Image: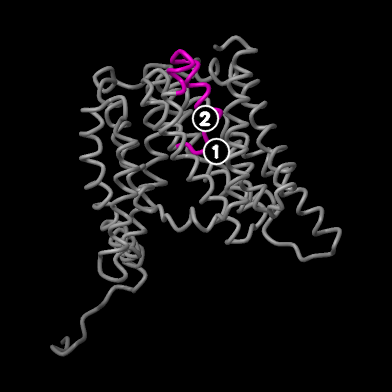
């Protein structure tokens, strides 16, 4: 006969450990996500009212202003609690928006636009990297800071900076300088490039190629090009994704160079080069290519096609709202005059080189 006082049997603690961790993670993300959605909804509405500006531009501006107000007026610690949600929106949601964009582009377009942009892309990349080395040296910018600004300008902004940081272990302060500089000229590009494109009489394809090769970060490329036109946006995204692939050979070269130096000095071996490169690789590029493959072979139902661009545009607006909410104006100030000057010179040189190479290759 069983005792009435027997203790209840409890499941092993590990049974629900994953669920508890997932719950804590979602709880940390949801407040910031809710604030980003609250900013993105009116930004998307304003973007429909003023399509020449577009929802993404309104999103990043309104997000930056809202973030500054939260940090100044909200109770202490509120901004820190919201940051995990902002980070997810600014990274994962942005990557998801690029993947959804892939559903509107066939793989044949990816190959055609990507290959056609190769001379302009490689030329602007060379100007950015060589300029960072030469001009950075003249200005007395630390070589590591110059490298980060160079790859951020020549490849894909914050993503390239993060990848190179993972590859070479750059100091946190120098990463902050580079990010502050890159963010400054991302915002300048969103404002200045569309009117410059109209002034130069650029076609949709030409502007898409120019913005895809001459603007730093993916979010800024998307915001700038789509404010110029849908076709320009599609071209720019494909060019930008092709350009992002340059992260791989650059990181491989840097890791091999650093590893060679460490072996020569007899330093201890850290994480393997292959693992560092794998972690640095922008996996969303694979998702974009898979989505493009689905579009190429008509796997996507026809009834979905009118809705997918709307979803993608809102996701982009949401992502830029999160990036704006995370932006701290102090980072721009911390960049200091010399790194900021280097970023300005490289940004102008890459933009001018892009226009010149397009003129030579017949894109203008």
The residue depicted at 64 percent of the width and 52 percent of the height is 145
Q: Which residue in the protein does label 2 denote?
A: 240
CB atoms of marks 2 and 1 within 8 Å: yes
Position above or below: 303 against 3? above
Q: Which mark is residue 41?
A: none
Identify the secondary structure beneath mark 2. helix
Q: Position of residue 187 (x, y in %)?
A: 43, 40
Front one among 157 and 201: 201
167 to the left or right of 206: right
The residue depicted at 57 percent of the width and 50 percent of the height is 178
Mark before the other along the chain sequence, 2 or 1: 1
| Quarter of the figure with the C terminus | top right
Q: Which residues are magenta?
A: 196-218
Q: CA distance from mark 2 to mark 1?
A: 7 Å
Q: Position of residue 60 (x, y in %)?
A: 35, 42
116 to the left or right of 80: right
Front one among 11 and 339: 339
| Quarter of the figure with the N terminus | bottom left
Give the crowd class for mark 1: few <14, some 14-19, many >=20 residues within 10 Å: many
Is residue 197 located in the magenta-colored stretch of the structure?
A: yes
Q: Which mark is residue 156?
A: 1
Identify the secondary structure beneath mark 1. helix
Q: Position of residue 36 (x, y in %)?
A: 28, 49
């Amino acid at each position: 006969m069983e005792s009435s006082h027997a203790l209840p049997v409890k499941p092993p603690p590990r049974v629900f450990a994953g669920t508890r961790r997932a719950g804590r993670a979602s709880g940390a993300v949801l407040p910031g996500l809710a604030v980003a959605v609250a900013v993105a909804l009116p930004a998307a509405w304003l973007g429909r009212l003023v399509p020449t500006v577009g929802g993404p531009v309104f999103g990043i501006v309104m997000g930056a202003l809202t973030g500054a107000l939260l940090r100044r007026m909200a109770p202490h610690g509120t901004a820190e609690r919201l940051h995990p949600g902002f980070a997810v929106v600014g990274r994962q949601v942005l990557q998801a928006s690029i993947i959804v964009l892939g559903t509107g582009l066939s793989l044949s377009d990816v190959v055609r636009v990507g290959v056609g942009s190769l001379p302009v892309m490689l030329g602007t990349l060379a100007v950015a990297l060589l300029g960072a080395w030469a001009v950075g040296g003249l200005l007395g910018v630390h070589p590591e800071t110059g490298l980060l600004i160079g790859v951020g300008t020549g490849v894909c902004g914050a993503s390239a900076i993060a990848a190179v940081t993972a590859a070479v272990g750059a100091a946190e302060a120098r990463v902050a300088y580079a990010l502050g500089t890159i963010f400054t000229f991302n915002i300048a590009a969103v404002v200045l490039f569309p009117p410059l494109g109209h002034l130069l009489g650029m076609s949709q394809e030409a502007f898409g190629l120019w913005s895809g090769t001459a603007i730093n970060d993916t979010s800024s490329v998307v915001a700038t090009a789509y404010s110029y036109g849908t076709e320009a946006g599609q071209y720019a995204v494909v060019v930008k994704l092709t350009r992002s692939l340059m992260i791989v050979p650059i990181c491989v070269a840097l890791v091999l160079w650093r590893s060679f130096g460490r072996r020569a000095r007899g330093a201890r071996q850290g994480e393997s080069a292959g693992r560092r490169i794998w972690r640095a690789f922008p996996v969303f590029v694979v998702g974009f290519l898979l989505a493009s493959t689905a579009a190429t072979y008509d796997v996507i139902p026809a009834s979905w096609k009118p809705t997918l661009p709307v979803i993608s545009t809102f996701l982009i607006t949401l992502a830029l709202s999160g990036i704006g909410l995370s932006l701290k104006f102090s980072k721009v100030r911390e960049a200091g005059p010399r790194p900021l000057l280097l970023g300005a010179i490289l940004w102008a040189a890459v933009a001018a080189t892009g226009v010149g190479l397009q003129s030579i290759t017949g894109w203008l």
